[in-house]
Image (spheres, rainbow, N blue to C red):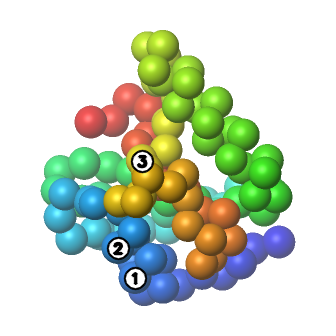
Amino acid sequence: MPLSLSIDRLAATLVAWALPGPPVVSELVAGFQGEAWLVESGGSRYVAKIYYDTQAAVEVGLRMAETVERHGIPSGAPLRTTDGALHVQRLEAKALARPSGYG
């Protein structure tokens, strides 16, 4: 069920997040639950994802990841958009998260 999103289209969508610099985007291997891209910006690394699941299911997972990370367990919690949203809907339910173990 790949969505075949172009890197240029993804990069244009990243303006929803306050990244520390211009993003450099590279594709990661598509998985069972969606597609993912590595986003490097200002010395930080993130993962942008498009999920093949419903918005409700994606939001539950993102909120759970935030809760777990607040309790000290690295979980790849989402980086909220500049307006505080968990994701943007332009390209389905896409989230940007800092990968566990990366600064």
- Secondary element at tag 2: helix
The x and y percentages for residue 79 are 42, 47
Dot 2 amino acid type: Val
- Horizontal relation, residue 27 to residue 92: left or right: left
Answer with mark 3 or mark 2, whichever residue precedes in sequence.
2
Amino acid bearing label 1: Ala
In-front residue for pair 27/8: 8
Q: Quadrant of residue 52?
A: bottom right
**Residue under the point 75% across and 74% down:** 2
Residue 87: horizontal and vertical position, in percent?
A: 55, 59
Q: Nearer the viewer, residue 78 or 45?
A: 78
Question: Is residue 92 shown above or below 41?
Answer: below
At a point 26% along the width and 60% down the height, the residue shown is 19
Where is the C terminus found, in terms of image quarters? top left
Location of mark 1 (residue) = 12
Q: Residues within 10 Å of mark 3 (few under 14, many from 20)?
A: many
Residue 39: % across, % down: 37, 60
- Read off the residue under disc 2: 15
| Residue for point 39% across, 77% down | 11
Q: Secondary structure at mark 3?
A: loop
Using residue 79 as the reference point, say whether residue 67 is left or right of it: right
Q: Nearer the viewer, residue 23 or 17?
A: 17
Asked whether the viewer can see residue 7, the reply is no
Where is 94 relative to 8, above or below? Answer: above
Point 48% across, 13% down: residue: 71
Alpha-carbon distance for marks 3 and 2? 13 Å
Specify which label sits upstream in the sequence, 3 or 1.
1
- List the residue tagged with mark 3: 79
Is the C-beta separation of discs 1 and 2 under 8 Å? Answer: yes
Task: Quote the CA–CA distance across marks 3 and 1.
Answer: 17 Å
